[in-house]
Image (cartoon, rainbow, N blue to C red):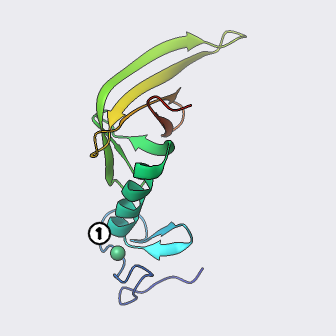
C-alpha cells in the first residue's frame, strides 16, 4: 500500500489524523479513514452487533478501539489467576461494560492478549 503524504484525503473525506499513534489512518471495512471516523463507524456497528473486540485501557475504566477511541465504559473489572492443565499459571480478565446507548456487555480473556471479545448481555 503506498504511503500517504499529509495532504492526502482518505476515503472518509478527511486527511489522516495528524497526531497520535501510527500512520494517522485506519483501514476499516476496506476503506481508509481518519481515526475519528473509524471510531465513529465502529460505535455505529456495535449498536447492531452482538459481539465486538476492544482494548481495555491501562487503568481499566474504558474499552477503546486500537487507536484509542472510547467504545464503552467499564463498569466492573476483575482479574483472576488460574492454573492451566500442566501447571502453567495464567491470568483471566473479566470485563463488564456499558456502551453510550445503555447496552450492557460482558467479556473475558487472558491478560496475555490486548484484545478482549465482548458479548451483548442476554445474547447467545
Ligand atoms: Zn474522517
Name which quarter of the figure residue 16 lies in.
bottom left
Which residue matches tag 1?
Answer: 19
Residue at 50% of width from left, 13% of height from top? 81
Instruction: Find numbered disc 1 in the image and state the secondary structure of the residue it sits on.
Output: loop
Residue at x 56% of width, y 84% of height: 2
Please tell me how many numbered marks the rendered image carries. Answer: 1
30 up-or-down from 92: above or below: below
| Camera sees residue 21 | no
Q: Residue at x 56, y 19 (%)?
A: 90
Residue 70 on image: x %, y %: 30, 50
Q: Residue at x 57, y 31 (%)?
A: 124
- Out of 113 and 35, give the one closest to the viewer: 35
Front residue of this view, candidates 100 and 67: 100
Report ligand 1 position as a quadrant: bottom left
Q: Position of residue 36 (x, y in %)?
A: 32, 66
Residue projecting furthest to the right: 86
Classify residue 121 as left or right of residue 101: right
Q: Where's residue 77, x and y in %?
A: 35, 24
Crowd tier of the residue under label 1, counting other residues whose Cα lies within 10 Å: few below 14, some 14–19, many 20 or above: few
Q: Nearer the viewer, residue 61 or 52?
A: 52
Q: Is residue 101 above or below residue 113?
A: below
Above or below for 34 versus 48:
below
| Residue 59 rendering spot, x and y as whole percentages | 28, 34
Q: Is mark 1 within 8 Å of ligand 1?
A: no
Quick one: quadrant of the N terminus?
Answer: bottom right
* Residue 46 shows in the view: yes
Amino acid at each position: 500500500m503506498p504511503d500517504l503524504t499529509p495532504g492526502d484525503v482518505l476515503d472518509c473525506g478527511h486527511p489522516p489524523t495528524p497526531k497520535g499513534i501510527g500512520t494517522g489512518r485506519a483501514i476499516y471495512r476496506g476503506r481508509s479513514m481518519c481515526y475519528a471516523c473509524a471510531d465513529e463507524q465502529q460505535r455505529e456497528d456495535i449498536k447492531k452487533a452482538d459481539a465486538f473486540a476492544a482494548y481495555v485501557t491501562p487503568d481499566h475504566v474504558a474499552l477503546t478501539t486500537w487507536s484509542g477511541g472510547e467504545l464503552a465504559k467499564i463498569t466492573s473489572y476483575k482479574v483472576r489467576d488460574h492454573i492451566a492443565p500442566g501447571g502453567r499459571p495464567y491470568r483471566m480478565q473479566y470485563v463488564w461494560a456499558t456502551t453510550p446507548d445503555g447496552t450492557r456487555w460482558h467479556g473475558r480473556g487472558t491478560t496475555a492478549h490486548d484484545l478482549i471479545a465482548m458479548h451483548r448481555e442476554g445474547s447467545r
